[in-house]
Image (cartoon, rainbow, N blue to C red):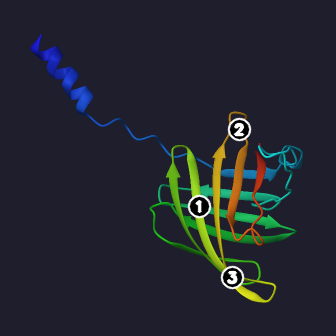
Amino acid sequence: MRRHVLALLVLLLTPAAAQAPTDFAGTWTLDAEKTMKPGPDGRIVMAPMLGERVVVSQDATSIKMRITVQGNVVAATYDLTGAESRNVSPGDITVISRASWKGDRLIIESTSESTDQGKPITVRTTRVLWIDKAGDLIVERTGTPASAVTPSRSVYRRER
């Protein structure tokens, strides 16, 4: 009886195995039809946040994206250990980001400098990425200021 109690205590006191992060690796193409469906607020915002096509590679410490936008390729790498990442967006805009996991979702919080009506502004965005039950990659974006960041949602399907 003591052995059973001891075994039960060991099981109860041993931390549960951490959930493996979602694997986004693959080639994804914008699904415009699904992207055009109204969001929870009833709005439709066509914003292909990862371009028309994105090739993703991923390992335990980083996720790399090769994003095709109107024939141009933009490369971005995000550190998955919590360290700061620096990428350059079109227009030579430096974007500073931190990526973290919340369950099966990847959260990328970014900051960059821009102009709005000729005045400098700081743009802060949060992108949340996950794979839904249908196997689609969902990307939702929110941020500030509202004049520079429209809340949006993009849906990508994996190429076979």
Q: Residue at 51% of width from left, 48% of height from top?
A: 102
Q: Indicate which label's residue lies in the foreground, 1 or 3.
A: 3
Q: Which residue is mark 1?
A: 108
Horizontal side of residue 92 vs 52, given as left or right? left
Quarter of the image with the N terminus in it: top left
Callout 1 amino acid: Ile
Answer with mark 1 or mark 2, whichever residue precedes in sequence: 1
Answer with mark 1 or mark 3, whichever residue precedes in sequence: 1
Q: Which residue is mark 3?
A: 121
**Nearer to me, 70 or 148:** 148
Q: Residue at 13% of width from left, 16% of height from top?
A: 3
Tag of residue 83: none
Question: Can you give x and y, in whole percent of width and height, for residue 27 in the image?
Answer: 73, 52
Horizontal side of residue 38 vs 3, given as left or right? right
Cα distance between the residues tagged 1 and 3: 20 Å
**Nearer to me, 93 or 53:** 93
Q: Which residue is mark 2?
A: 135
Q: Indicate which label's residue lies in the foreground, 1 or 2.
A: 1
Question: Can you give x and y, in whole percent of width and height, for residue 132 in the image?
Answer: 68, 38
